[in-house]
Amino acid sequence: MWDVLKGSQTQKTTPGAHLFGVPGAVNDDSTSGWRGQPSRVRVLEFFMMTFAPRPLDVYYLFTHQHIPTCAITWTTRSDGNRTTMTISFARQFRWISDHVDRSVLMLGLAAVLGVGAGVGSVAFSTLLDWCHDVFFGTASYLDSLSDSPRISMILVPAVGGLLAGLLIFRFAREAKGHGVPEVMEAVATRRGNIRKRVVVVKSVASSLTLGSGGSAGQEGPIVQIGAALGSAFGQLFGMSADLTKVLVGCGAAGGIAAIFHTPIAGVLFALEIILGDWRVQTFSPVVITSVIASVVSQNLRAVFGLSESVLEVSETFALHLPWELGNYLILGVVCGALAVGFIRTLYWAEDAFDGWRRLPGAAKVGVGGLLTGLIGLADPSVLGSGYPAINEAINGGVLVQGLLLLLVLKMFATSSTLGSGGSGGVFAPSLVLGAAAGGLVGHAMAWLIPGMDMAPPGAYALVGMGGMVAGTTHASLTAMLMIFEMTGSYSVILALMLTVTIATLVARAFEPESVYTMKLARRGGQVGRGIDYALLSRLHVGDAMFTNYVRVAPDTPVSEVVRTAKRARSYDFPVADSDDRLLGMIGLPDIAQAMEAGVPELLVASDLTSTSYTPLYPQQSLADALRQFEKTDRPTLPVVQEQGISQIIGMLDARQIMNLYERVALLGGIEALGPDGQLKQFP
């Protein structure tokens, strides 16, 4: 029934040998092409083998089209004590990648990734609920506090944190914290490559942290899990770095859409925070993944009886009077300032735990859980993700004293959990803080202006969530659409837009880094739009410029410039005199514009020379050069000898900046550069 071709044991084979032309696989002149291969083989095959390990046995399986289904390699150590089996399916997936149109393949992978993200979110939620049941039973944190000894409320988060810490520091250190910065760093500096083990480690560690009462959210873990799946797909199919990054963004969008049922916000999260890329070829697969992940998650949750909605809004809020927008403007200022305080408190806690150098990493997570448990004694609602507290604040079930206590304690509980190295997200804590701050502002306005027809404090709590998320993430669009999709309250969209915008402006004014980019900036990175600007600032224009450019004399006829462009396959040329003094730039767009205006063809290059640019110089950083490209629409810029000296010595293309950036990033990033910024090695 099954057809298997085994490499000959009489010949030497090597682990990881490939399908065509491999040592150990013997080719004869039969019509089948390989000795022992059946003439007819099903396209979908499997393998059967004996489980007695043999040194360096390689099993090869073929389809009718000479496509490998898998290669199985037994490798025995020289001492004979350990045998390892490796099963590789890479060649089959690479064949698919080579023979299927990339755009079609990307859309197909995006759809599969959407299914994976949807299933993964349900599996993660199920694992999280199971961990909560193990630590606390089916009771809530408040019921556990009243039904169990107080010592258990303190020790349970500590035990969960210790277990999560052991897992993180043993198998995948990048699974600590909220996870999104690691995804951004992988996109910016590692071509989108994320270790596959992160999927398992992040899932289990986050479930242990949150299930035992750790104060954090679910979005960070699910984003990192989805992104790791996307990265695995890209590596498996041998996709380019750009396409692998898109798949990472797809996985992140699918995770957000699946966990919160917010497909639009999932798309914006990936484009605005993870990728910083709004091109159509990026937008389309991200949308497909987000939509499918949301649909799959909702249906699976219905089948397994899981909660389908994170937030429950029982009242329809509305903007009562136009002047009430002033209240929401004040709320935006409050949320922006509070977001800065939250970011700095979180990283202050991280510095404090990092300062305990003699304490093992796993023990630090346990201590963080212990502190979180102590805080939870004062207010159990700060434990876990905090969604019940949000629902109570929105629906008017929390008094002023409770909101103030929730605001202060949640900030410190989250800082303790994540600052110590626990695994979880910052999105849910931001929602809790925003709801508490909004509720307080609503109560304050009702007290300051009594008798006026204003929206209830619950409306301010709802809008405050968006303001807080925008202030911490610096992602206005994501925050607006996230709150709108989670609550379905379109009636407060005007107030939400104003609060989110003001909160973002205030937060950026006092803290340029978001809660995500702050971690990377503290490591020496400046990530924006998928690029590490700290690395670009260490590289120079002289490292990337080219000197074999074509110079155009000022008296060159325009018709000759066009012929030169065809020969050189270039669209932009420097105009320089005989002493190589730069006079300007001329390009085919300039010529086309002149022709459309009806200008005679008896023009020379100097007539169309443009000076609407700033020339570069060799010592200038590539970060500055990239910003210059953003200010102009020219594909290339001239490089002069020194700043203020117009003698041209080369040209720089924006694509060369990214090529050099990716090559240095592969060598190890900033670590591949010497103290003077020169490359230590260059392949």
Image (cartoon, helix red, strand yellow):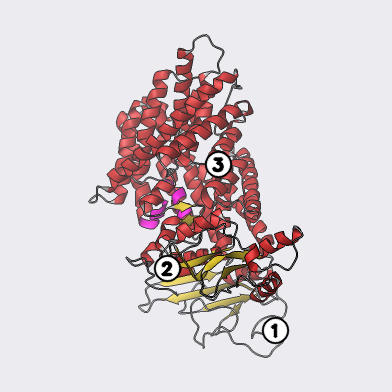
Task: Work out whether 250 lies above or below 663.
Answer: above
Name the residue that disc number 1 marks: 32
Task: Please tell me which residue is depicted at 62% across the width and 40% down the height of the picture.
Answer: 298
Q: Give how far across and how far down residue 275 sits, in percent.
A: 54, 52
Mark 1 secondary-structure assignment: loop
Q: Is 256 left, or right, of 169 in this rendering? A: right
Q: Is residue 139 visible?
A: no
- Give the dominant element type of the magenta stretch: helix, strand or loop: helix
Q: Residues within 10 Å of mark 3 (few under 14, many from 20)?
A: many
Q: Earlier in the sequence, mark 3 or mark 1?
A: 1
Q: Give how far across and how far down residue 456 sits, in percent.
A: 53, 18
Name the residue that disc number 2 marks: 667
Task: Work out whether 38 lies above or below 300.
Answer: below
**Which mark lies nearer to you, 1 or 2?**
2
**Which mark lies nearer to you, 3 or 1?**
3
Name the residue that disc number 3 marks: 259
Q: Give how far across and how far down residue 258 sits, in percent.
A: 58, 43
Q: Is 332 left, or right, of 678 in this rendering? A: right
Q: Disc 2 marks which amino acid?
A: Leu
Give the alpha-carbon distance from disc 2 to disc 3, as whole Å: 36 Å
Which residue, as the protein is rendered here, is positioned at the far right?
598
Task: Please tell me which residue is depicted at 54% across the width and 34% down the height of the picture.
Answer: 310
Q: Is residue 272 magenta?
A: no
Q: Earlier in the sequence, mark 1 or mark 2?
A: 1
